[in-house]
Image (tube, rainbow, N blue to C red):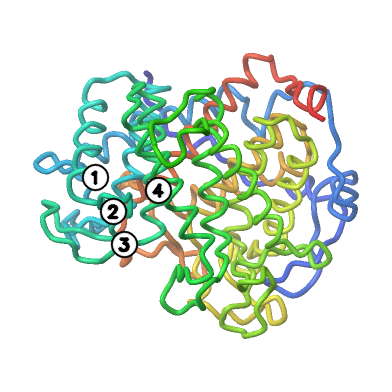
Amino acid sequence: MQRRDFLKSTTVLSTAAITSGLLTNNIIGKTIPVTKDDSSKILRNDISIYRKDKLTHIGKYTLEELKDTYENELYNYIIPMWYRKGIDKKYGGFLCHINYDDESYATTNKTVWYQSRGLYTFSHIYRLFDKDERHLQVMEQTKDFLLEHCVDENYNWYAKVSQDGTKVIEPKHLVSDMHAVHGFGEYYLATGDVKALDVAIKTSINFMKKLNSPSVQYLSWLQPGTSPYGLWFHFLSALTPLLKVIGEKVNTYEDYEEYSDLERLEGMAELCVSRMKAHADYDKRIIFDYLDRYLKPFKEEKYRYLANGHGVGSAWTYMAEAMRIGDRNLFRKGTDVLRWHFTKGWDFMHGGGVVNRVSPEKPDEFIVGDGYKPSFATDDGSVGLMLVIENDHDHWAIDWFDRVRTWAYKTYFDEKKKVWIHRANKEGKPVYSYARRGNFHHPRAVMLNIESLKRQIQRNGYVSNFFDKAK
């Protein structure tokens, strides 16, 4: 594959593109311009416009050029970076805490969900992009490390272990459970290993039991029974690809042998969507990150904030599930959530980026953290925008994709070091002191956007038939 400088494919929106329409932006507390006359109507009425025109460019670049730049990044930056430093060749798994200045390890202890995330990423690479036997070896060694050192007999997954896995440093954690489903589910899709599917399903059942318990405590500072939006939508993103392929196979899990895998996972996916909808306030057009045990917003300020990062990050999971089940209204709901939180969370004052968590009543006060801007928000948000473009040709999404991608690559990508920086501060400067290499959100966004662009190119730039077929 020809090596290209993928940063050259980004472009700043021209001022001519910002023509009309106003909506309140919470970061600066005033109205801001939005793109295109009909896009302003979309924002006001929450009605997306289905278009059948031919799309040739996003910004200044063709669909082929965007696909090529993403592929260049995947093959020439992302994959080599992990083989250079991030893969534990001795014990298996991934070493993700790497200093940016000299590439030394900040710690060699292993966060368990990072191991499952890496299993997902390399399984997805192997399944759809590159059948290199090295990738398969990484997958197998990571799978074995996880099963030998990171889980108990009831499929409760630990939070952190030593590099060799012999010492449990932090006990069980719901995030580890959830991402084990991502990792082992994708490993099954890549290899057909039914034992990996069993691990994913048994973990899913145990995870749902705990997540629905009135005594569950996701984080130590949260009240028991708190509903965490982030777990619901991330779990849905693990279920959707499995539900596309597993069919009616009956699992060997004895307590549930009368149900098929499909029936069990379908019910879980439906519950995820229901809980995600419960977190949305449609009058205020916001997502609350946490709800109390009665699925109501908290009154206490420390629990009550907008999830701008999770808002834009979750939108594509609505859409992917909607495309699987043929539900146009669910797809629209994902589009609404994406639009709400890009509009409310985008920091025009400091040049761009999604401010992660703000108060709905006092949006200029960052009540959780210091107003940092996580790269996962623009990564996952770009996937949502690309799905809207693919299925709707919505001008709002086309303009925002160009804006978001331009800012993200200018901010998070360090061309000299050839790495993606995990977060930026409030002013939009990359934070090099946070020694963490992401092996999930950014690689996944790159791959999902490649897949979408390939489908669009195959249709010669015409919109998909989803809205013609969906109910």
Q: Which residue is mark 1?
A: 146
In this rendered view, identify the residue nearer to me: 249 or 470: 249
Residue 408 in view (yes/no):
yes
**Image point (50%, 75%), residue name:** 224
Q: Which residue is mark 3?
A: 172
In this rendered view, identify the residue nearer to me: 174 or 103: 174
Mark 1 residue type: Leu
Crowding at mark 4 (Cα within 10 Å: few <14, some 14-19, many 20+) = many
Quadrant showing the N terminus: top left
Mark 3 residue type: Lys
Q: Which residue is mark 4?
A: 179
Residue 232, image x and y in percent?
Answer: 56, 54
Q: Helix or strand or loop: what does disc 4 sit on?
A: helix
Mark 2 residue type: Val
Determine the CA span between mark 4 and mark 2.
9 Å
* Residue 14 vertical position relative to residue 166 in the rendered view, above or below: above
Total marks placed: 4
Q: Quadrant of residue 281?
A: bottom right
Determine the CA span between mark 4 and mark 3.
13 Å
